[in-house]
Image (cartoon, coloured by chain):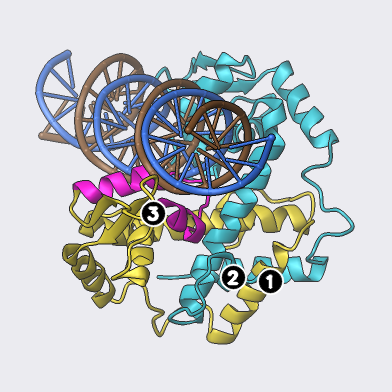
Chain colours: A yellow, B cyan, C brown, D blue
DNA sequence: TGCAAATATATGTACATACATTTAATGTCA
DNA sequence: TGACATTAAATGTATGTACATATATTTGCA
């Protein structure tokens, strides 16, 4: 369905404004689908995202600063997302011995196993009836990258 | 900057996963810019969005159900966003006489003037050095619309 | 050495999101 | 008509986002 029909606004000021609204709408649509996929595993999208970064570092630890640097949304509050993961025993937090201001965050065995079981379901992979083919995906990636080249 | 560099992840499982992450990242980037633009006017993005819908209805009222139907993020909580706008005297809320379960929400004169003054700044318009030209914008819109055609 | 600046993280507050539940009004149909 | 379902909105709770401020540690340099 075209964005005009999705939000029942037949006319946009210009193609520029329409692309912006379309982008935010589509991202929200995607977020909802992802959140629903993670829910059976008791994870939110930001929690999953942080777990994935920690696995990338494993067995080395990550600091909060590293997580923020690698997160999709850089302004979100990594500290509190780690709180939730720690409560669920999916990560550990220990004071960094080399720099006692920093905190070493590590994914646990349970965390690694949870990631594996999520990925085994295949919900993160493209399927045969994906609406965009590989070439279109590449085109989309290029347009998005280019869009952010301002200032 | 390419998404690989933005989030310092050199390899993605596939173009599909990369497009998803790119989309969410770019939407977040855009949201931050928009939020910063609205901030001097004391509005958040969802508040601005609802005001714009109300202007589209004006002088007719809108119900909460209509707002949800037209909002970008359909699962957000329109009731409480209207609370904030009402506190700022930008909208009014009255019980709908025809159906006393429903609430008639109307944009006030102050609300209309605020929207005008925001739009006068031109922050919502494309400028000469926009990275994507009109044709590329159209291409992006088509890809996004197509992406959502699942199930 | 000692003290200010910088760094790393945590905490506070307002707002938004996601989803379940509640309250009130209206519809329906036996 | 009266019980029950449906509808419209508000409210509760957990989480996340955005941004300011606080706390503790380390660094730099006079």
Callout 1–callout 2 Cβ contact below 8 Å: no
Give the left or right position of residue A17, taking residue B148 as reference: right
Q: Identify the mark at residue A46; answer none if there is no mark.
A: 3
SS assignment at label 3: helix
Of the image marks 1 and 3, the number of the one nearer the N terminus:
3
Of badges 1 and 2, nearer the viewer stands: 2
Residue at the image point whose x is 48% and y is 61% from the top: A70
Q: Identify the mark at residue A143; answer none if there is no mark.
A: 1
Residue B64 can be seen in this image:
no
Measured in 3D between alpha carbons, the distance from the residue under mark 2 to the one under mark 3, in whole angstroms, is 20 Å
According to the image, label 2 marks what residue? B5
Which residues lie in the magenta part? A64-87
The answer to whether tags 2 and 3 share a subunit is no
Residue at the image point whose x is 70% and y is 61% from the top: A148
Of badges 2 and 3, nearer the viewer stands: 2
Measured in 3D between alpha carbons, the distance from the residue under mark 1 to the one under mark 2, in whole angstroms, is 16 Å
Residue at the image point whose x is 66% and y is 75% from the top: A142
Q: Is residue B19 above or below residue A111?
A: below
Main SS of the magenta part reads: helix
SS assignment at label 1: helix
Give the left or right position of residue C29, taking residue A142 as reference: left
């Amino acid at each position: 369905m075209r964005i005009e029909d999705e939000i029942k606004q037949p006319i946009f000021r210009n193609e520029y404004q329409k692309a912006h609204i379309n982008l935010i709408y589509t991202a929200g649509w995607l977020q909802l689908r992802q959140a629903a996929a993670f829910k059976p595993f008791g994870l939110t999208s930001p929690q999953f995202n942080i777990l994935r970064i920690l696995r990338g570092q494993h067995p080395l630890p990550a600091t909060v600063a590293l997580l923020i640097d690698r997160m999709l949304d850089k302004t979100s509050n990594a500290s509190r997302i780690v709180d939730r993961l720690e409560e669920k025993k999916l990560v550990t937090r220990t004071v960094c011995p080399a720099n006692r201001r920093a905190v070493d965050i590590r994914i646990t065995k349970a965390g690694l196993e949870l990631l594996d079981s999520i990925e085994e379901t295949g919900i993160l992979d493209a399927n045969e009836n994906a609406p965009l083919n590989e070439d279109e995906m590449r085109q989309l990636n290029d347009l998005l990258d280019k869009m952010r080249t301002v200032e």
